Image (cartoon, grey):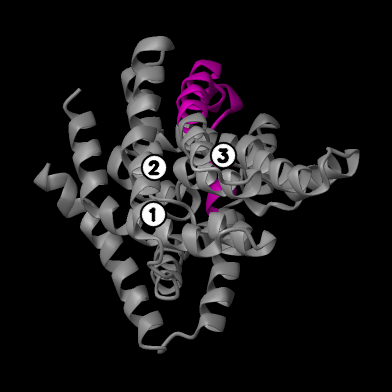
Amino acid sequence: MLAIFLKTLPFFAVIGVGYWAGRTRFFSEEATGYLTKFVFYFALSAMLFRFAANISLAEVLDWHLVGAYLWGTAVVYGIASAVAFLRRLDVATTAIEAQCAVIGNVGFLGVPMLALLLGEAAIGPVMLVLAVDLIVFSSLIVILITGSREGHLRLSILKTVGMGLLKNPMIVAITAGLVWSALEIPIPGPLNEFLAILGGAATPGALFAIGASLATKSAERAEVALWLSFCKLVLHPAFVAIGALMLFPVDTYSAGVIISAAALPVAGNVYMLAQHYNVAPHRASAAILFSTLLSIASISLIIGWLTTL
């Protein structure tokens, strides 16, 4: 357990440096926004494309794995939604809370950290988790919030969702990489080096950006944030574990990867959605802050337990 903690510590140390830079205003909020854009549109996209181009679709696409992760995520999404409705929250706020309960920082934190801790074989399952989060649950929150405000669902909502997916650089990078792999085109040396250099900036850049963005997060509504952090860091990996180890025939290694991915803290894009739709942004902000701090210990415990299986 200590060995895993020591391996994860440098990742959180970079997040800490970013937090210090943002907190002291050495790195302004505008600078953090531009760094996030660089990582999201360039560095992380290069990394994902390179990873995807070097594995086959057959290696990545495992419907049992998708089913296990989707089942566990849907159960926790339902629990968070039920608790929100019992507190008489509206549909839009419920959707934000449910999103906090299940959407982890897979792109910025999960891809680089799990590839290092669990080996490059973890990349395929992690990309599946990322695809499910983006395609299913990022679409669902837009449908729920927009539909609740308008009182009905229009075809234009589905068009908005579809265009959002097509414009998401992570989806584009993974899809383009898998197509390249399927065509069995070797990546030319200079292009591979270019992708390696640009993609190499994804890990430190993403971690620093996470920390700098946390510096602007508030700790309001602590009791709600702690409940959502519990959902994300404990319930989510627990139910994904039930799906992967009991309900679906998934190999132990792949099960460990998706359980680890489920244990990641709340993703920053949940706050961006909450802010965009002006629905409980402080609640999402606090959930990101608390879950990230608590995950320093929880991720080490979960990955340490999984490595003993």
Position of 188 compared to 18: left or right?
right
Q: Main secondary structure of the magenta part?
A: helix
Rendered-image quadrant of the C terminus: top left
Distance (Cα) linking label 3 and label 1: 21 Å
Q: Which residue is mark 2?
A: 232
Rendered-image quadrant of the N terminus: top left
Which label sits on residue 225? 1
Tell me the residue at 51%/30% (across/down): 78
* Residue 93 vertical position relative to residue 38 in the rendered view, above or below: above
Q: Earlier in the sequence, mark 3 or mark 1?
A: 3
Q: Which residue is mark 3?
A: 133
SS assignment at label 3: helix
Tell me the residue at 35%/19% (across/down): 242
Mark nearest the camera among 3 and 2 is 2
The magenta region covers 47-76
Q: Earlier in the sequence, mark 2 or mark 1?
A: 1
The amino acid marked with disc number 3 is Asp
Q: Residues within 10 Å of mark 1 (few under 14, many from 20)?
A: many
Distance (Cα) linking label 2 and label 1: 10 Å
Q: Residues within 10 Å of mark 3 (few under 14, many from 20)?
A: many
